[in-house]
């Protein structure tokens, strides 16, 4: 016989007998079930420990804090042994067709990554890893777990390029960049209004990030003016190593390239360069 029993502290609902469920109804309609196996269903006969069906579910918590994250839901995975890398809770996103066939479309895994207090976020599409966010930072793709391959930065911005001279004024100064990982893409345009004599080999200053130590990347170059050499000459600008500056190299009559200083720049000259460099 099923019973309802109350005491000063507890209310006990008991479905007596083996295999019997506790069913909660409203106006003859079942709203919730606690099965004999201990599964709880709301709006459905449960196949899992907690099984909810119906309209959108919401987890809600109210608190007076306004300046920090508020814990609303804990997802807890417990190991009976010592945790190793790769262990952690998983959230599955499942689609089901009219034939009651369930398909795991994606999973979100939060797994141990080097220490018990360090976690990697791993996103799977079906059974295949597509994106990983390691505890060391950055993003890796398509099953790559090496932190050295992680895309660790994406940034878009502007900067103000200048000519390395003691006195210079400008008609126009434009500097734009996009940084993807350790690669910086730049576009520069400088139009000179007036300039004092200068012999610096660091011609353009003000790059947004210092370059790597051993690389001289050549930049796509277009200049107007800049009387640095004679006829049949070639000129290219290049990012200087371990610096935020750009120098130039030129060749006379198709000969070898040599460094060029800024002495040939005059009022009305302009310089346009585009390209990329490594940081």
Image (tube, rainbow, N blue to C red):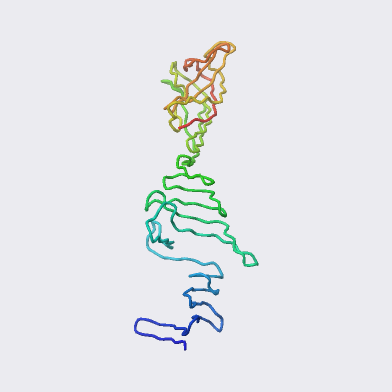
> Furthest residue to the right?
98
Q: Is residue 229 above or below residue 98?
A: above
Q: Quadrant of residue 212?
A: top left
Residue placed farthest to the left in the image?
A: 8
Furthest residue toward front: 81
Residue occupying image coordinates x 49% and y 48%:
132
Residue at point 52% right, 24% down? 218
Placement of 65 over or under 24, stated as above or below: above
Q: Is 242 rendered above or below residue 231?
A: below
Across and down, in percent, residue 32 comes to 51, 77
The image position of residue 48, as x and y in percent, is 51, 69
Q: Looking at the picture, how far across and down is residue 173, in whole percent?
A: 50, 29
Q: Nearer the viewer, residue 174 or 63?
A: 63
Q: Nearer the viewer, residue 213 or 79?
A: 79
Q: What is the quadrant of residue 208 in the picture? A: top left
Q: Nearer the viewer, residue 124 or 73?
A: 124
Indicate whether 27 appears above or below 272: below
Residue 122 in the image: state x and y as whole percent.
49, 51
What is the number of callouts on the image?
0
Image quarter of the C terminus = top left
Along the line of sight, the residue nearer the viewer: 180 or 118: 118
- Residue at x 43% of width, y 18% of height: 200
């Amino acid at each position: 016989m099923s019973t309802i029993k109350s005491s000063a502290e507890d209310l006990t609902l008991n479905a007596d007998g083996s295999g019997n469920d506790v069913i909660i109804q409203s106006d003859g309609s079942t709203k919730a079930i606690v099965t004999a196996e201990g599964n709880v269903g709301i709006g459905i006969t449960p196949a899992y420990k907690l099984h909810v069906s119906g309209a959108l579910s919401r987890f809600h918590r109210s608190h007076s804090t306004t300046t920090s994250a508020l814990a609303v839901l804990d997802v807890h995975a417990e190991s009976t042994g010592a945790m190793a890398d790769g262990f952690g809770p998983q959230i599955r996103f499942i689609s089901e067709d009219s034939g009651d066939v369930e398909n795991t479309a994606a999973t979100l895994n939060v797994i141990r990554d080097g220490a018990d207090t360090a976690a990697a976020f791993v996103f799977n599409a079906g059974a295949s890893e597509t994106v990983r966010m390691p505890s060391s930072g950055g993003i890796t793709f398509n099953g790559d777990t090496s932190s050295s391959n992680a895309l660790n930065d994406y940034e878009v911005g502007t900067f103000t390029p200048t000519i390395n001279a003691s006195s210079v004024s400008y008609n126009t100064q434009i500097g734009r960049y996009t940084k993807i990982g350790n690669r910086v893409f730049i576009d520069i345009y400088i139009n000179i209004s007036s300039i004092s004599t200068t012999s610096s080999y660091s011609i353009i200053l003000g790059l947004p990030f210092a370059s790597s130590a051993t690389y001289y990347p050549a930049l796509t170059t277009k200049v107007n003016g800049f009387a640095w050499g004679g006829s049949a000459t070639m000129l290219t600008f290049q990012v200087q190593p371990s610096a935020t500056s750009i120098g130039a190299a030129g060749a006379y009559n198709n000969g070898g390239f040599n460094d060029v200083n800024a002495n040939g720049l005059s009022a009305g000259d302009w310089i346009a360069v585009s390209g990329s460099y490594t940081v």
